[in-house]
Amino acid sequence: MGMNYERINEWILTEDCPDLSHLGKCEAVMAQGNGYLGLRAAMEERYVGETRNLLINGTFNQFDAEEVTELPNAADITAVELWIDGQRFHLAEGNWEEYRRELNIRTGELTRTVSWTAPNGKTVRLSFQRVVSLKRLHDIGLKITVEAKGDPIELKIRSGIDARVTNTGSQHFSEIEKRFYEKKYIQFVERTTQSNIDFVLNAVHQFARNGETAALQTDVNIERRYIFADYSIALKAGETFTIEKLVNVQTTRDFDAAGLTLSQLQEKSLEDLKLLEQTGYDALLEESAREWQEEVWDKIPVVIKGDKDSEFDLFALRYAQYQMRLFLPRHDNRMNIGAKGLSGEGYKGHCFWDTEIFLLPYYMFTDPQAARKLEEYRYLSLPGAHRKAQENGYQGAMFPWESAWLDDGETCPLYQGTDIITGKPIKVWSGIIEQHISADVAFGVWQYGVITGDEDFMEKYGYEIIMDTAIFWRSRLEDGQDGRYHINDVVGPDEYHEHVNDNAFTNYMAAWNLKKAAEYCEILKESKPELYARLDEKLNLKENCPKWKEGAEKLYLPQPTEEGILPMDDRFMKGQYIDLTKYKQQDFVAGIMKDYSLDQIQNIQVCKQADCLVLFYLMEEQFAPEVKKASWDYYVERTLHDSSLSLSTHSVQAADMGDDDMAYDLFRKAASIDLGPYMGSSNEGIHAASFGGVWQCVVYGFGGVRMLNGSLRINPRLPGNWSELTFTLYWKGEKLKVTVTKDHVDVQNLTGTKQVELSVNGEKRSV
Amino acid sequence: MGMNYERINEWILTEDCPDLSHLGKCEAVMAQGNGYLGLRAAMEERYVGETRNLLINGTFNQFDAEEVTELPNAADITAVELWIDGQRFHLAEGNWEEYRRELNIRTGELTRTVSWTAPNGKTVRLSFQRVVSLKRLHDIGLKITVEAKGDPIELKIRSGIDARVTNTGSQHFSEIEKRFYEKKYIQFVERTTQSNIDFVLNAVHQFARNGETAALQTDVNIERRYIFADYSIALKAGETFTIEKLVNVQTTRDFDAAGLTLSQLQEKSLEDLKLLEQTGYDALLEESAREWQEEVWDKIPVVIKGDKDSEFDLFALRYAQYQMRLFLPRHDNRMNIGAKGLSGEGYKGHCFWDTEIFLLPYYMFTDPQAARKLEEYRYLSLPGAHRKAQENGYQGAMFPWESAWLDDGETCPLYQGTDIITGKPIKVWSGIIEQHISADVAFGVWQYGVITGDEDFMEKYGYEIIMDTAIFWRSRLEDGQDGRYHINDVVGPDEYHEHVNDNAFTNYMAAWNLKKAAEYCEILKESKPELYARLDEKLNLKENCPKWKEGAEKLYLPQPTEEGILPMDDRFMKGQYIDLTKYKQQDFVAGIMKDYSLDQIQNIQVCKQADCLVLFYLMEEQFAPEVKKASWDYYVERTLHDSSLSLSTHSVQAADMGDDDMAYDLFRKAASIDLGPYMGSSNEGIHAASFGGVWQCVVYGFGGVRMLNGSLRINPRLPGNWSELTFTLYWKGEKLKVTVTKDHVDVQNLTGTKQVELSVNGEKRSV
């Protein structure tokens, strides 16, 4: 493991030894992006086992009818091959020293330095820099500096645009056009095969020798799916040579390409490239770093003070912020956040309940405009939710478990993993019966509305989503012989148990959704009759509202056992108890699937992830402390945390229950999902929701922040090794600064437009 | 360059130092196959820059409308990853010694041995063996032996079927099914996206420890486009462990799968795999080696005796035979021979005039049944030739310049290479105007008919092809103001000159085709009235025959200049003369395109390859020796041999002209196209036609064999360093053995069914 945290004080994540057997780790955790695009940190030279990803948010394509739509991997623009006197630069060959790869999360710059001695004995000092502009969403810069050490060298450079990349073998693009303009500007156009989105990529190289601009002869090459230039230059000992590769990527799906024909977009993007060429790498970096400072670090500052360990805690929190900005499509409400952000092909760029339950809290409290866009996406994707309901024999809005482009509907793949008994791929039921997502979306919308006070959003989109999902739930309820409604044959959050009846999380959330819809019906009828009339026309509120109420009242809600344990469904507690120690100690997830088939796991008391505990977390006031405690004890023992969503939920619960050590321990584990020593865990991309989870551990858990019954509550409990925690929150448009020390909670209203009422450790305050 | 020829006496091609910067060389020249499939010799472990190819002849697929159809790269079955105490085996890491990779062309086995010390200090002796069965066309075997040297080791093995491969980025397959049966048999089904051919691949592993069968626990894994098993075992120092990976591949395009549903094919292929498992690697190899011996080396023996240099000459000839069997679809007349055989993706598996002009001679003279299949293919692909004629406004059979599946018609790509002036891809005109192919096919058919005496073929297919192409040519002729017919706007064999008028090669061949068709018309009318009637009904011979005659008579045939030079077209000789020394000295082809655009080259006196000289070669009696000599002097100086087809033509001509040194020198160069020191030349695959060329250098050039006016002529001229040349020939069904020494030519009739009349050095013989 080459990860090293000695410079985290300087906001720097460091790898001090290349790990060529675990390339995915740094590729993912050192990825860069700006919400429009994500660029995985594959190295400039190529390695066996690498994954080179350039993902443009929202550009989904379906390879064939057997596959689900996914974010296609655009042509690679990061590869730059260097030869030193005929010897290709590659870390597995020759010898390297003084290696450092660093991601500066403050500026967003990725750098790598190494001294390399080729097998032919020539030594060079190499420095690689890379930035994805946070300011100019289409622009990427690379800079490479080569210093000839002891000897003169002949340096050969090959660089261009390489569209031979795929998504794990699936090719999403047709080649459309490739050309050199003016012998220097490289343009490549590719089109997605099914969604017909044109991608225009441009690149230009510029050179300097010992700091002076140098002109090199260009050997132009156009091959299949690959356009590149070869350059060569002789350097004297001690000379340095700098290569800047400036790149942009634009697509016909972009808002800022609206109305342009492909050839107009080609022209425009080429003009943009010429501007970028004039800007140059250094200015591009500076401008982008300023944007990071102003838009993230100055706007959403966090402080953790404490012992040495707390330095990692602060870094982990800031790293979570870095990631949550990297993959946030702040520019476009037609897209959302993939489960792996924009750092890998895992989960195909699809968004899940992760958005509302794990990520939305951060955005609602720190960047309400961005949060609104994420929920507007849900509104815009209602047509797909309606179609899914119809296809499944229901009414209203049945949101897809996995959501991609607006009208795609359900995009959950049908198979995943290996059944060790049958030798077949395992059928994934989530797309069909993991139905709590519809209530999760409604819950997110409601939370957003209350916390931001954004009534404009609620009127235009929010109320409708809550009511439309209520229509789904009402149509979903099944009559039981007990005179109650039931929801049978579902998957709850714990995906190790399929086809369960009366999953507690699902039923409580559905009941909440029905009740909330009915409640808003009555409120709007009174307070906003015009809006009510519009919604009534669309959703037949007059007839539906009473049915929602009745549904919520008659829906069976699982009740705690005598021991106070809430049964997560009607089967789990009857399952076989087994010793899970082996799987808990494994440094990879889902190890149990190597010993048991999913069919067998159905009858074993093992949870992939929090299920009832998420419910306690979302509806903390509905459950008695004893029930929470007894359930905690029961489920924690049986939970493998085989989902990255699990740890932070547990940490916040532990903090709520006053188990500070447990809360802190779980927080550190949550923070280590990607930053920790598990070299394989980030291969398919980082765990987007877990960064929301890290923030929740800190602000919800240790900071004790919660929205309860529409009010803001702050009950902080700092970990033992922290002396201070400072963070900011937007509450109904007012920006609050909260400073927590061991014996003091200070809340300031930085905006000061209107008074904010809140409760701090049970005591009312007004700021 | 790691190639080493010290064991060529033992029929062994050796690489004694791995060249990781030039992987394509050995991948291609050490490829294996059996005409049904070709397997590129990528190593078991993966490398940057490798190309892993498994190509099944005839299974063409078109990725999208912008691309032409090509042989798709089937799932990789050769990768086997090994870890020694956690360290992945890879030649760039750790240290290796005693490396040898050897292709035994006599047995068809590929082996590799190396002692490797991992970065962790553990040393293993590894041996890799691989065979593609020549007997069982679907079966492939791999065997790996690991010996723990100084220390005990933990060996981990990962192996399976990996369908993430593409053709330079284009994915031709949809995943259909993947499964483990009985926890050991791996089955993967993929389907071509456009041609809907199902590929079923099966694999099984078996193990032995110190020679004793060993059972290992299987960790089964199914991922996207990838199904594999993990195994691990602890070995004591000195122990050896053997892994056999037995594989088969079958497709729904196979003749022997005709009538089977996919699931029946899956079942059948799994049963076949179980048989293969029982056979085991060693017996599979032995059986296949026996087939090579009986079907190739015993049937088509060649002997060259002479000095040390002649050992390479004999090896090169046998290597050509190895290749010509490897890529020969002897089992199926619906496919032909790709320009790169089955050893790479270059030219997409398409066949060209290469078949008739360069390869057919070898097959006609040594394996007439196989030769017949190649020409049956042309007959079966007539529908595409008719369509091409119609699309271009002509009649009859206009054969595609590039031919793939039977009804594909023209499959020549529209663009290739880079125009250094415009920065755009260069338009390829061959598919539209390189029209001599239609006469080349007719010429091949005629040669086949005469040499083999296969009248059954001629009646069923041959005459019709010659007449159908004559219909094309007649419709193609253009009226000139000189009262002659002309063929304007074509590309001749020399592709550096496009849109030329009256290309000598094209016009002479077209005239021959018209004349030959008319001649056959008259012969058949007399001798085979029923056949004549059938063909007349189909091709309207009564009306066409006089038109063919008239066309042949009036077609303008370029005539030699006063200096005796035959002008290759109406423009070449007016072009600019430039010094080509630079390009002739380059160790790669087409270097001139780096300095001049193709537009500029049009007006330069430079030939990519033989043009007039091929004509002299095919129609040697039509041209006076002075014309041949003057043209030779003129064109050779201006020819870059940027096509692999060029050298052997020149060599045979040089031999004909009595320039023995030149002939030998050119033969050696032709033999070195793939076997020589040019490390990049075989990247996209070997040069199939050049192997036919090597055989022609020897048998036509030094052996002096020719069919002239329907008779066999043998005028040998051995190179100075050869003392004996022995080869066999089929002539009209009789197998002749020709032994040439410096002062003697012995011809034996091995079959002895009927007398064969021939001329040897101008003297008639009857054997």
Image (cartoon, coloured by chain):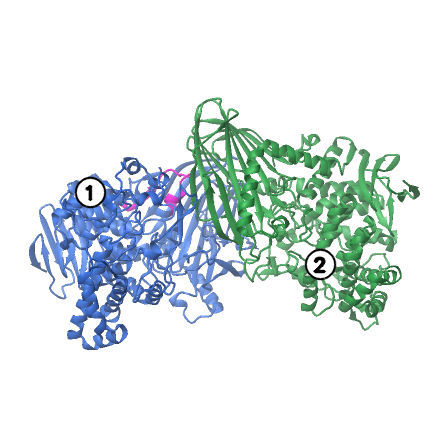
Chain colours: A blue, B green
Give the image location of residue A687, x and y in percent: 32, 49
Residues marked 1 and 2, same chain: no
The verdict on residue B382 being magenta is no
Type of amino acid at the residue the image marks with label 2 = Ile
Q: Nearer the viewer, residue A274 or A524?
A: A524
Q: Is residue B631 visible?
A: no
Q: Is residue A595 left or right of residue B141?
A: left
Find numbered disc 2 in the image and state the secondary structure of the residue it sits on. loop
| Location of residue B196 with respect to B735 vertically, above or below | below
Number of numbered callouts drawn: 2
Locate residue B709 relative to residue B162 in the image: left or right.
right
Disc 1 sits on a residue from what chain? A
Q: Position of residue B64 (x, y in %)?
A: 54, 60
What whole-number distance in Å separates the C-alpha atoms at marks 1 and 2? 86 Å
Q: Tell me the quarter of the picture where residue A116 sits.
A: top left
Q: Disc 2 designates what residue?
A: B604
Reading the image, the residue beneath label 1 is A634
